[in-house]
Image: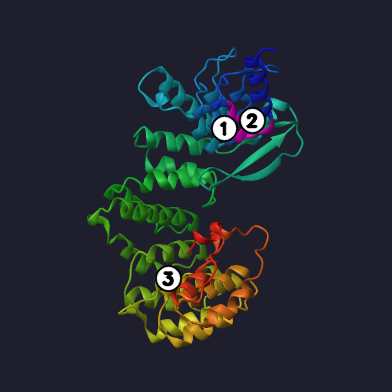
Amino acid sequence: MGTGDAVADRLVAAVRRGDAEQVRELLDAGADPDTDDGSTGLPVLCRAISADDQPVAEALVQGGADPLRRLPDGTTPLLRAMEDGSPGLTRAVLPEVALYPGPPREELLGHARRLAGLDPEAELRRRTGLPGPVGRTRRLDDIGCRYERLTLGGLTLGDGHAAFLTALEAKLRLRTPFAELLARALTRPDRDHAVWTASVLALGARLDDETWAEATRLGRDPDPLLRLFAVDVMLSTIIEDAQRREPALQDRALAFRPWAEREPDTDVLAVLLNGLTWTSGPETEAIGLAYLTHPDPLIRGWVPSLLDRDEGVLRPEGLAAVLALARDPDPEVREGTCFWLWHYQGPEPEIGDLLVELTHDERQPTRAYAVAALALRDDPRCVAAEHRIGPLEPGMAPDTLPLTAVWWYQRRHGEQKEEPKEEQKSDG
């Protein structure tokens, strides 16, 4: 066996194992990214796609694999990825050349439109002819949105086809009607689903008065699900506006104030309060304080971010609210409030005593934020409290916690003799 054959075999084996790092190493060493998998006669890119292995598929495309290679059945790896229904996988293998005007783009768009109307469960039953229960697994795509993988008789399909179509239309600057994007979102009525999110992001990126007006009208609908979509689009517009720094649109978040005061639905209200964090002032604080004792912890958790400051210091009502929320019975609310205090760094002595109290909290992130907040306030009690953080719990990474704040406190005061570990020092 020649050297080239050995490298090809190693590449096939690495793709089958799902070893993206090894795939990259072999490609860098000269392996052909369009190597065929001997067991199927198809390129290894198709193997990665059928396994819904986005990291490997991405490595192959970045290494030169051709997603538009015409296969014996008339499809291409890109079309197969689209069939799979994983938005992230499809984006990973989408070549820029497929977006240029011409037959490949028309084929891409036509295929995406056909698949967007696909019912994955019905399609699995059609392909397998099986009546049994369909397995469902939640997955996260490459931008953190949820989608489902449906399995029946050994076949698997994702339910994110419409998300890819929406993103593709936006990339091609096609103005899909508001009503059509709303209809797509309602097929997956979950704010975290990739299909819903794609519609929201596409509309939010428009920044025009027509889209804002349509969302505003929808926000008065009696159906809370439609109001949720409306406020999600409006929040997306505000965020997009902030990123583009469009001065004419900066006051749009003020429209959330009267709406938040009358909104009965908790899910909608949570997004409204999120939107109000883009405003400030006594009026916004008053809305936040009105929800201080709301029965849903999700709503109470937004209150600190709505508080106003007088020359950088909390007003008495705001301080009282923070002290109450930091002792909230819900651990999520306490953690969120402590995280906010870590960034606030106000001078009030009551907050220093509160932070010491929070270093005993049941949750490790809360304890870590409390210790870090003490250190940033130059409170010497942070040194004795540091050990209460404890060994990192499973799933906790050093770069997700402010674990070096005490080290920097001691350095400022000339008390530190040894540097922290390199991976932790980056957080200082």
**Dividing the picture into quarters, in which one does residue 296 lie?**
bottom right
**Dividing the picture into quarters, in which one does residue 6 lie?**
top right
User: Which secondary structure class fits the magenta region best?
Assistant: helix
User: Label 1 belongs to which residue?
Assistant: 118
Question: Quarter of the image containing the N terminus?
Answer: top right
Residue 256 appears at what percent x and percent y?
36, 64
Q: Residue at x 38, y 37 (%)?
A: 170
Residue 95 appears at what percent x and percent y?
45, 27
Q: Is residue 184 left or right of residue 390?
A: left
Magenta span: 17-26
> Mark 1 or mark 2, which has the lower sequence index?
1
* Structural crowding at the residue carrying mark 3, measured as other residues with C-alpha within 10 Å and reported as few (<14), some (14–19) or many (≥20): some
Out of 74 and 269, give the one closest to the viewer: 74
Residue 119 appears at what percent x and percent y?
60, 35
User: Label 3 belongs to which residue?
Assistant: 305
Q: Are marks 3 and 1 in contact (CB under 8 Å)?
A: no
Residue 112 appears at what percent x and percent y?
49, 29
Residue 53 in view here: no
Q: Which mark is residue 123?
A: 2
* Structural crowding at the residue carrying mark 1, measured as other residues with C-alpha within 10 Å and reported as few (<14), some (14–19) or many (≥20): some
Q: Are marks 1 and 2 in contact (CB under 8 Å)?
A: yes
State the separation of the CA atoms marked 2 and 3.
46 Å
Out of 362 and 383, give the one closest to the viewer: 383
